[in-house]
Image: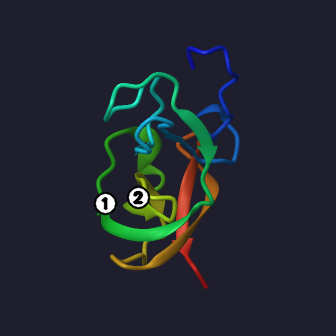
Amino acid sequence: MSNGKQALADWTTGAEAIVYQSCASCGSLQYFRRSFCRVCGAPDPVEKCASGEGTVYAASLVVRAATPEARAHVPYNIVLVDTVEGFRMMAHGDNDLAIGDNVTARFAQFAGRLVPHFEKVK
């Protein structure tokens, strides 16, 4: 972030957290970190930690992995999740997830990296 604030640690840095941003000017939410709001262009959106809860918007079961590292995990599910906070994110998910399922995030190793992995709320 350009204002000198320390960025919150999340899964992209090895921490078990999902971080999103909220614009103080227009209220828009964005998942990928930027130094500005993607809607209004205001600088320095505020970083927040997500709860990890949401609803499956889409799911795609991968049966043919693109890399040798990912082949060890086949089949694996890639899901789009609408979070309770109001942003949508792509992540891994249990293979039995379907559109509309309520989910919660945990974190798992995938091809040598820590990634968010959603499972059905029990």
Q: Is residue 32 visible?
A: yes
Q: On the image, numbered disc 2 is attached to which residue?
A: 74
Q: On the image, numbered disc 1 is attached to which residue?
A: 63
Q: How is the image coloured?
A: rainbow
Q: Quadrant of the C terminus?
A: bottom right
Q: Position of residue 110 (x, y in %)?
A: 54, 48
For residue 64, above or below residue 33:
below
For residue 105, above or below residue 122:
above
Check residue 10 in the rendering and tell me which mark sits there, or answer none. Answer: none
Residue 37 in the figure: left or right of residue 1: left
Q: Amino acid at mark 2?
A: Val
In front of the other: 97 or 83: 83
In front of the other: 108 or 7: 7
Q: Position of residue 40 (x, y in %)?
A: 33, 31
Q: Amino acid at mark 1?
A: Val
Q: Classify mark 1: residues with Cα within 10 Å, few (<14), some (14-19) or many (20+).
A: few
Q: Classify mark 2: residues with Cα within 10 Å, few (<14), some (14-19) or many (20+).
A: few
Q: Position of residue 84 (x, y in %)?
A: 50, 65
For residue 48, above or below residue 108:
above
Q: Please tell me which residue is depicted at 47% across the width and 40% down the height of the picture.
A: 69
Picture quarter containing residue 82? bottom left
Do callouts 2 and 1 mark residues in contact (Cβ within 8 Å)? yes
Q: Quadrant of the N terminus?
A: top right
For residue 4, above or below residue 92:
above
